[in-house]
Structure formats: structure tokens, C-alpha cells
Image (cartoon, rainbow, N blue to C red):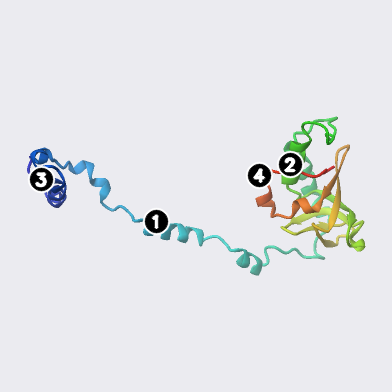
Amino acid sequence: MEQPQHGTAPLQEYLTDLVIPHQRCNVNIIPDHITMLHGTKSKKQNSKKRRAHKSQTLSRREYASLGLNTLPTRQMSYEQALPLHKLWRGYIREHLNLKEGDQVPQIHEPRYEEFSKLLVKMDFHGAKLKVIQSKCETLVGIAGICVMDTKNVLKLLGTDHRLRTVPKSECVFGMHVGNMEFTIFGQHLNIRPAERSVKKIKGFIEPFM
């Protein structure tokens, strides 16, 4: 058994006691193989680091207190939202993989379910929407470009430059993409956009068009 180097003697003594007597002469500690033991962080230290990193992001309460989830109701014009709508038109064609002349799949067609799931997951910021049916009659007919999409409401900027808040679950929306017309049930959209885009939809969706 080789003479242990400085710093490895306690470890070699401990390991030697664990080995059967006639094999103890073969115990040899190589310092290069134990360098990884020095400075190893405990699970507690790692969890503290993760918590510290997580705390750098804003909570929903802090986000709301800074006014980041609100928009001015009278300081926005419809023309200012038109570039956003133009971007959205390019986005939706790419998202739905639409080509010139494509038609909305019928409910009996094989690709209907997948197409409906893509519609549910899409981002509505920039979409032109119109309330075509609602439990609240005063909401019917409201139309505009969607400038904010939250968990429960859509905020539509109308041609009269007024920003209106429309509850999703209470309404059915109409939307046009090229020569295609969609009827969207707001109850399918009651989830935050960021979560909706990655949500795995397991069940079959009711007619969406």
C-alpha cells in the first residue's frame, strides 16, 4: 500500500476500514480522482440559487402594479393598430400553413381537428374580430383590432378609436382570413396566450368554424 499524500490520509484510513483485511494493502487514493469532491454544493445551496434566479422575474401582482397589463382607452388610434394587423395576417397564414385558394376544412374531414387545435393556440394580437353572438346583447356588434389578449378578456380597438373590453366566455367571435370566415367560441380561449400556445389539447374541440 502506497504512502498516502497529504490531505488524503483520513479518506484512505476510512476506506481501508471498509475493505476486508487481506485486500487492504491494495487500497490506494489518487488525488486527481477526488478533486471533484472539493467544493461540491449541497442540494440546499443549489435550491437557494434557483430561488434567487427565479426572484429576478416580476410576479403577476408586480406586473399589474406597474400598469403593464393596461392600455389607455382614449390615447390610441385605429390607424396605429393597422401595422400590427398587417403583421398578424402574415403570421396567421404561416401558423395555419395556408396557401392561396385554401378552404376551411369541414368537420367530417380528417384534418379538421388538427386545424381547430391550431386556431385555439394562435395569437390574437392584431386580429380583426367582431362579436357576432353574446349572452349580453350590448356586446353584439363590437368590432376592432385585438390589441390585448388576457386570460378572460379581449381588448378591441375600434374604428372610432375607442378601446373596448370584451369577456371571452360570454361571446362568439367572427374573424376573416382572406376568403375564409371563422366563428370562434370564446370559451375555448379562457387561458393566457403564452400558456394557450403550448397547451396540449387532448379532447376533441367543438365546431370552431
125 relative to 32, above or below: below
Please tell me how crowded label 2 is: few (under 14), some (14-19), or many (20+) other residues with Cα within 10 Å.
many
Q: Which mark, residue 117?
A: 2
* C-alpha separation, residue under disc 1 versus residue under disc 3: 33 Å
* C-alpha separation, residue under disc 4 versus residue under disc 3: 58 Å
Q: Which mark, residue 200?
A: 4
Query: Where does the image place residue 198, in percent across and percent down from the top left?
Result: 65, 46
Query: Where does the image place residue 10, in percent across and percent down from the top left?
Result: 14, 52
Instruction: Provide the residue designation for mark 3.
Output: 4
Instruction: Provide the residue designation for mark 1.
Output: 46
Amino acid type of disc 4?
Lys
| Viewer-closest of 49 and 82 | 49
The residue lying at 85 percent from left, 56 percent from top is 171
* C-alpha separation, residue under disc 3 versus residue under disc 2: 66 Å
Amino acid type of disc 2?
Lys
Please tell me how crowded label 3 is: few (under 14), some (14-19), or many (20+) other residues with Cα within 10 Å.
some
